[in-house]
Image: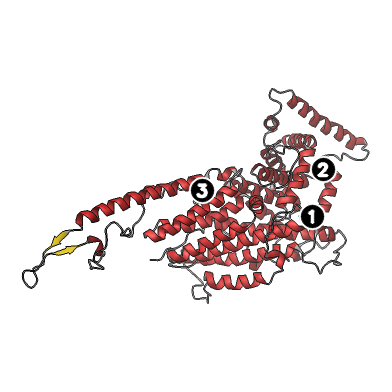
């Protein structure tokens, strides 16, 4: 047993343990309150550092975090409400009615895994609130205790020996800590907790329902399915954005999709199908999973191209393969998307009614994932023209601009990495040879991206200042363009009246040559052009203008799939 039950009479050894553990927790809190600067929850965190390997340390840490949970129980319940408001629509990792019943019975103070996953959910909700994701009005400040406190509580209660981390709750805790790490921009931490999750998943055979215990209740089955496919999508997503291998392979995933029913229609004894005719939000959620399964194969296409370029041996090089062109795949995907109920085509303003907003979240997430798919498919193609890149980037920005900003902020930090794909499309064009007209088009798209970032980053500290920094970079390029234009006009003006004698066929009248009429191959073109009105010659930006781009052009690793080939 982890923490003692706080309800019902306790006798004998259990009562003794209750007195000891509760007393230790209360004493610890009393000591903390008497410290200078006691208003800071950070002081409590220093009193209870990360647990070591000894049993006595583990017991002490459990007791101290139990005392913390008791002291912060009001904030914990509010943060869990936030979780169900803005995180659950994308990561529905808890069956809400049964989870809340366990909290009401204080079971999280007895079950180590449930405690860890509860703290992890609070850590994520708190981080999202800090970053401005909350759209409802909260009467109390949720910034204290800080997100890091809940994160450390969850981290400390995950056994160092993962063989002892049994059950869904520990896996869910690892998943939530990985998502929180993304929110905080801590990518190594994300990889760490995703690694823990995958280890536990493999040890427990979660990838195949035939290996699951026969006595699982419908609630337990549905929580397993939601967790499995949630982290499948996260696995694909992290591989795209930060590189690395895909640990889930859809062909090896023998797990059903979650049943398309609301939580209140799923009980420990069965499923209530009486309202099955109504459209359920999980239909859109499952469609998003379909998109990630397509993304998995798009990733394979990109990585396969890279392997061929580096002469990696392709043992199946003779296999038949279908070309994953962006246009062909997106046509099929959009046909399927259009067959979904109308609720998933509309992205209405947030209402505050969870039953309605769940559909809005799915619509927003579908749009974000469709654009991610389009970006990755584009990176799988060879020799993409500047015009095509601009078309795709412009469409991505158009889609994001019509999604209500409340949904975008609620999806929060992960969404900004979708925007990173747009940034890289534009960045790949800027690094190549530009004409004046192509730069003007790129410039317009960059400023639209800056506008979108500005809508999102008001409180999102990972993107703070990105929009302004992006505008500053555009200003630097504008200044370079003005200087280049002035220089070229001066050169053309100086050479406009150069006289070139011709000795062919005897003496002739001198010929006036406008040097701007000579192409790089030395051929003459249209004569008589006014040097003041001639467009700039094709050019490349100097390296110093390409090295200080703000996030989201920084992808954190060379293995990111946001690398789009340019037309030769």
Quarter of the figure with residue 240? bottom right
Q: Secondary structure at mark 2?
A: loop
Task: For label 1, count other residues whose C-alpha is less than 10 Å away and answer few (under 14), some (14-19) or many (20+).
Answer: some
The tag earlier along the polypeptide, 2 or 3, is 2
Image: 549 above or below 282: above
Between label 1 and label 2, give the one nearer the viewer: 1
205 sits left or right of 516 in the view: right
Residue indicated by mark 3: 551
Between label 1 and label 3, give the one nearer the viewer: 3
Residue 362 % position (x, y)? 69, 60
Task: For label 2, count other residues whose C-alpha is less than 10 Å away and answer few (under 14), some (14-19) or many (20+).
Answer: some
Q: Separation of disc 1 and disc 2 at Cα?
A: 19 Å
Residue 473 % position (x, y)? 44, 47
Label of residue 110 in the image: 2
Between label 2 and label 3, give the one nearer the viewer: 3
Q: Separation of disc 1 and disc 3 at Cα?
A: 36 Å
């Amino acid at each position: 047993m982890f923490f003692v039950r706080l309800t019902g009479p306790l006798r004998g050894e259990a009562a003794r343990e209750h007195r000891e553990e509760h007393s230790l927790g209360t004493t610890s809190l009393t000591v903390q309150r008497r410290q200078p600067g006691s208003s800071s929850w950070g002081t409590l965190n220093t009193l209870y550092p990360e647990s070591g390997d000894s049993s006595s340390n583990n017991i002490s840490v459990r007791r101290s975090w139990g005392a913390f949970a008791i002291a912060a129980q009001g904030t914990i319940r509010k943060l869990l409400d936030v979780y169900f408001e803005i995180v659950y629509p994308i990561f529905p990792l808890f069956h809400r009615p049964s989870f809340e019943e366990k909290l009401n019975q204080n079971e999280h103070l007895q079950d180590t895994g449930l405690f860890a996953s509860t703290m992890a959910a609070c850590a994520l909700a708190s981080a999202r609130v800090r970053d401005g994701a909350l759209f409802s009005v909260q009467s109390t400040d949720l910034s204290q205790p800080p997100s890091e406190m809940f994160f450390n509580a969850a981290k400390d209660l995950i056994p160092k020996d993962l063989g002892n981390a049994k059950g869904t709750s520990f896996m869910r805790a690892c998943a939530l800590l990985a998502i929180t790490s993304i929110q905080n921009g801590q990518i190594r931490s994300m990889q760490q907790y995703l690694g823990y999750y995958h280890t536990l998943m493999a040890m427990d055979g979660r990838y195949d329902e035939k290996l699951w215990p026969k006595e699982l209740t419908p609630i337990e089955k549905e929580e397993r399915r939601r967790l499995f496919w949630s982290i499948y999508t996260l696995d694909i997503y992290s591989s795209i954005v930060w590189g690395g291998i895909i640990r889930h392979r859809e062909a090896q995933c023998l797990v059903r999709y979650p049943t398309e029913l609301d939580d209140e229609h799923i009980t420990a004894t069965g499923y209530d199908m009486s309202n099955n005719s109504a459209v359920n939000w999980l239909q859109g959620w499952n469609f998003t999973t379909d998109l990630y399964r397509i993304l998995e194969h798009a990733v394979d296409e990109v990585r396969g191209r890279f392997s061929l370029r580096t002469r990696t041996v392709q043992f199946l090089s003779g296999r038949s393969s279908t070309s994953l062109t962006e246009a062909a795949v997106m046509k099929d995907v959009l046909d399927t998307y259009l067959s979904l109920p109308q609720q998933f085509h509309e992205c209405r303003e947030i209402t505050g009614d969870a039953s309605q907003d769940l559909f809005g979240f799915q619509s927003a997430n579908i749009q974000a994932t469709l654009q991610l798919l389009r970006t990755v498919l584009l990176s799988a193609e060879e020799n993409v023209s500047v015009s095509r890149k601009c078309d795709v980037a412009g469409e991505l920005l158009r889609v994001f601009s019509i999604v209500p900003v409340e949904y975008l902020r609620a999806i929060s930090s992960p969404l900004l990495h979708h925007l990173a794909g747009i940034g890289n499309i534009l960045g790949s064009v800027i690094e190549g040879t530009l004409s004046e007209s192509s730069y003007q088009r790129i410039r317009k798209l960059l400023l639209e991206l800056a506008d979108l970032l500005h809508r999102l980053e008001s409180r999102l500290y990972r993107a703070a200042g990105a929009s302004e920094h992006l505008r500053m970079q555009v200003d630097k390029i504008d200044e370079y363009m003005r200087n280049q234009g002035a220089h070229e006009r001066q050169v053309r003006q100086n050479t406009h009246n150069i006289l070139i004698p011709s000795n062919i066929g005897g003496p002739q009248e001198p010929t006036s040559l406008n040097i701007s009429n000579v192409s790089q191959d030395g051929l003459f073109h249209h004569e008589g052009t006014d040097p003041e009105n001639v467009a700039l010659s094709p050019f490349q930006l100097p390296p110093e203008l390409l090295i200080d781009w703000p996030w989201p052009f920084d992808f954190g690793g060379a293995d990111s799939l946001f690398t789009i080939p340019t037309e030769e």
